[in-house]
Amino acid sequence: MSSTLNTLSALSPLDGRYAAKGDALRPHFSEFGLIRNRVRVEVEWLKALAAAPHLVEIAPFSAATIAEMDAVVANFSEEDGAAIKAIEAETNHDVKAMEYWLKARFENNAEVSKASEFIHFACTSEDINNTSHALMLKEARDAVLLPMIDRVIDRFVQLAHQHADLAMLSRTHGQPASPTTLGKEMANIAYRLRHARKSIAAVDMTAKFNGAVGNYNAHLSAYPDIDWAAFNQRFIESLDLVFNPYTIQIEPHDSMAELFDAIARMDTILIDACRDIWMYISLGFFKQKLKAGEVGSSTMPHKVNPIDFENAEGNFGMANSILRHFSEKLPISRMQRDLTDSTVLRNMGVGFGHALLGLDSCLRGLNKLESDPARVAADLDNAWEVLAEPIQTVMRRYGIPKPYEQLKELTRGTGITKAALQEFVGKLAIPDADKKRLLDMTPASYIGEAASLARKI
């Protein structure tokens, strides 16, 4: 078999079967995305040094030079990335290769060439890498993940409003329970997802830029009179990141862990949702819109399988196994530095990729759903025993002895008809208005505030 990489020969389904679904993440989490961000950080650092009044050895750059430097970042290409990788083949060091490439790239610019030794000035590789990783995560979250989450939430809200009044039998422990509405159940999911999204969006991505072991040793050896902590904080904040002033050689990855945990919590909510919707499809509450030419089963022509929700559940599970490993492993480093985080961090796109696949599959499934009101109503109309709850509650109000026990004896473990329940109510010693209200009640009307809550989401 040819070793040429394509969607058929890719080792990971993210780059194979599902390659198109992950395209939006490639600019952020690919090797190219990492190198591009490293170049950005190095260029911005050099610009910051040149603009500092106390570093007299590096002159401020002209507007034309700054424009050229910005263009290198903005127009960074795969060819540029390949050139850096070619240098890395000789240096066996990725960040150093990028430094050499920058020096060569600006060798014809007299201003930058004169200041070339200030490229990577006082930096350890981790200063560049951790800042790049923070930028990658922040950009991928804000540009790709959150918009997809919003689309899924919006669809649940639509379903909540559409089915706000569609009374439905609840099932607690798999048994008939107090009625709800199909819309209210969708609203429950939307509310949970909104909270999860807020947690994901609220994570501040932190970065450190304080040298080999976090103490500005090299910085102060060259310029002892500069407040490097304040200077470097301003630099990190100029990148719209949060500065971490207390670190070892590496940024401790606590904000990364917080982000990964927040995404995993969202995934867990959606696993729960996918399983419930799978059950609603099985019960016939939802049908799935048919797609011409699509096959549900290789042998049973009648089947329309809930494959989108199954695919989503599987991918959310894959994402969580990876994301939770990240959050447990990344905050741990032996002494001031070990390298176990490096190879793990290269898989951030895998965790995000499976989460994105799950969201895409879930949304695709949600967009196929059509309720079957007749099936939902028939299921509810066969459960008159659920009215035992309101009846015994009214009995309690008027002091009738052992209301719970009386209804338990009447209904528990046996089917009960409308006639039998109304016969029981007719004999109760309660005010006529309350008796009429109970006699007029049906399982479909006993939904509390469900419809109102669904419309308010």
Image (cartoon, rainbow, N blue to C red):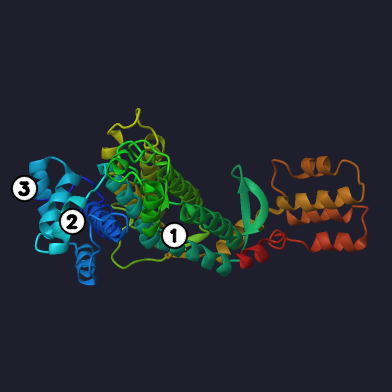
Q: Nearer the viewer, mark 3 or mark 2?
A: 2
Q: Secondary structure at mark 2?
A: loop
Residue 101's mark?
none
| Residues at marks 3 and 2, CA–CA distance in whole angstroms | 47 Å
Residue 2's mark?
3
Q: Which residue occupies 31% across, 68% down?
A: 292
Q: Is residue 303 visible?
A: no
Residue 115's mark?
2
**Residue 57 at x, y = what percent?**
22, 54
- The amino acid type of the residue labelled 1 equals Ile
Q: Nearer the viewer, mark 1 or mark 2?
A: 2
Q: Residues within 10 Å of mark 1 (few under 14, many from 20)?
A: many
Q: Is residue 366 visible?
A: yes
| Residues at marks 3 and 1, CA–CA distance in whole angstroms | 38 Å
| Residues at marks 1 and 2, CA–CA distance in whole angstroms | 45 Å
> Quadrant of residue 160 in the image?
bottom right
Give the residue pinned by disc 1: 149
Q: Secondary structure at mark 3?
A: loop
Q: Nearer the viewer, mark 3 or mark 1?
A: 1
The quarter of the image holding the C terminus is bottom right
- The amino acid type of the residue labelled 3 equals Ser
**Residue 69 at x, y = what percent?**
21, 64
